[in-house]
């Protein structure tokens, strides 16, 4: 009987010890849990900030690359247009003297009563030539009868004229041309100085 009571007592003590060990283990785990969470937050927060900064940096680089490419494209297009215009200007400046001589030859043929069929043929070719030049945005400058404009006309001399007022272009020596809105070649003109002064009667002077 005494032995049975002793065994029951031992079992109770063992159970109590087991409960105490389990309680101690849970308490220890509960104490360690906050430290573990704090460590994880300390490690994750810098990583998130670093990723956001890297993303922002990449976004800025992308925006700059887009702007640089747009500027490069615009500059390339502008340079291509300028190169095309310069090439056309150089070619047209070489052609214009040929056109000048053609006009002079046509005028000479008309003044010397050349065969009318030949003159008409030359005029037809001349008109075709002018139409080709218009396609390249080349237009002749009106000079005769116009007020002298130093931006379009080149004055070779001043001469009296009863037909044209002073400072008007009385005749054209060489035709001028505009290439679009740009002056390609100024028109060479004679500028009127107004009506000639009347000659005084010699008898009056004497």
Image (tube, grey):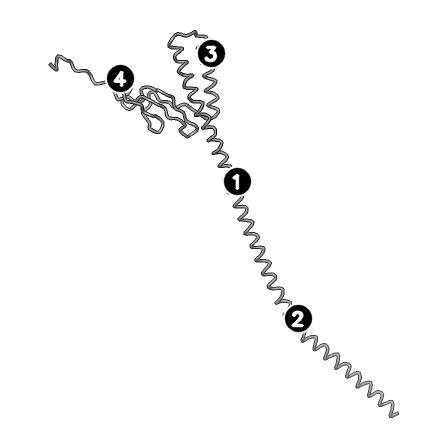
Sequence-earlier tag: 1 or 3: 1
Mark 4 surroundings: few (<14), some (14-19) or many (≥20) residues within 10 A = few
Q: Is residue 56 left or right of residue 125?
A: right
- Which residue is painted at 58% across and 55% down in the image? 55
Percent position of residue 30, x then y: 69, 75
> How many marks do you count on the picture?
4
- Which residue is painted at 59% across and 63% down in the image? 46
Quadrant hosting residue 197: top left
Q: Distance of mark 1 from mark 2, alpha carbons?
A: 56 Å
Q: Distance of mark 2 from mark 4, alpha carbons?
A: 111 Å
Percent position of residue 51, x then y: 60, 58
User: Mark 2: which secondary structure?
Assistant: helix
Q: Are the residues at dot 3 and dot 2 in contact (C-beta closer than 8 Å)?
A: no
- Which residue is painted at 79% across and 83% down in the image? 15
User: Mark 3: which secondary structure?
Assistant: helix
Where, quadrant-wise, is the N terminus in this rendering?
bottom right
Q: Distance of mark 1 from mark 4, alpha carbons?
A: 58 Å
Sequence-earlier tag: 3 or 2: 2
The mark closer to the camera, 3 or 2, is 3
The mark closer to the camera, 3 or 4, is 3
Quadrant hosting residue 158: top left
Q: Distance of mark 1 from mark 3, alpha carbons?
A: 48 Å
Give the residue number, with chain letter if any, for mark 2. 36
Mark 2 surroundings: few (<14), some (14-19) or many (≥20) residues within 10 A = few
Mark 3 surroundings: few (<14), some (14-19) or many (≥20) residues within 10 A = few
Give the residue number, with chain letter if any, for mark 4. 162
Give the residue number, with chain letter if any, for mark 1. 73
The mark closer to the camera, 1 or 2, is 1
User: Mark 4: which secondary structure?
Assistant: loop
Give the residue number, with chain letter if any, for mark 3. 121
Q: Are the residues at dot 1 and dot 4 in contact (C-beta closer than 8 Å)?
A: no
């Amino acid at each position: 009987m005494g032995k049975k009571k002793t065994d029951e007592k031992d079992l109770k003590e063992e159970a109590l010890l087991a409960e105490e060990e389990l309680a101690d283990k849970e308490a220890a785990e509960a104490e360690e849990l906050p430290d573990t969470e704090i460590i994880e937050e300390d490690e994750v927060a810098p990583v998130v900030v670093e990723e956001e900064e890297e993303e922002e940096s990449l976004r800025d680089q992308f925006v700059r690359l887009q702007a640089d490419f747009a500027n490069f494209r615009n500059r390339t297009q502008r340079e291509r247009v300028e190169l095309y215009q310069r090439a056309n200007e150089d070619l047209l400046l070489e052609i214009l003297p040929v056109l000048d001589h053609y006009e002079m030859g046509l005028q000479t043929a008309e003044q010397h009563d050349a065969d009318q069929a030949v003159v008409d043929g030359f005029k037809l070719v001349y008109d075709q030539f002018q139409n080709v030049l218009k396609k390249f945005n080349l237009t002749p400058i009106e000079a005769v009868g116009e007020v002298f404009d130093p931006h379009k006309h080149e004055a070779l001399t001043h001469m009296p004229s009863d037909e044209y007022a002073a400072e008007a272009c009385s005749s054209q020596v060489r035709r001028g041309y505009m290439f679009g809105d740009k002056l390609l070649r100024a028109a060479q003109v004679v500028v009127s100085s107004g009506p000639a002064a009347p000659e005084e009667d010699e008898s009056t002077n004497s």
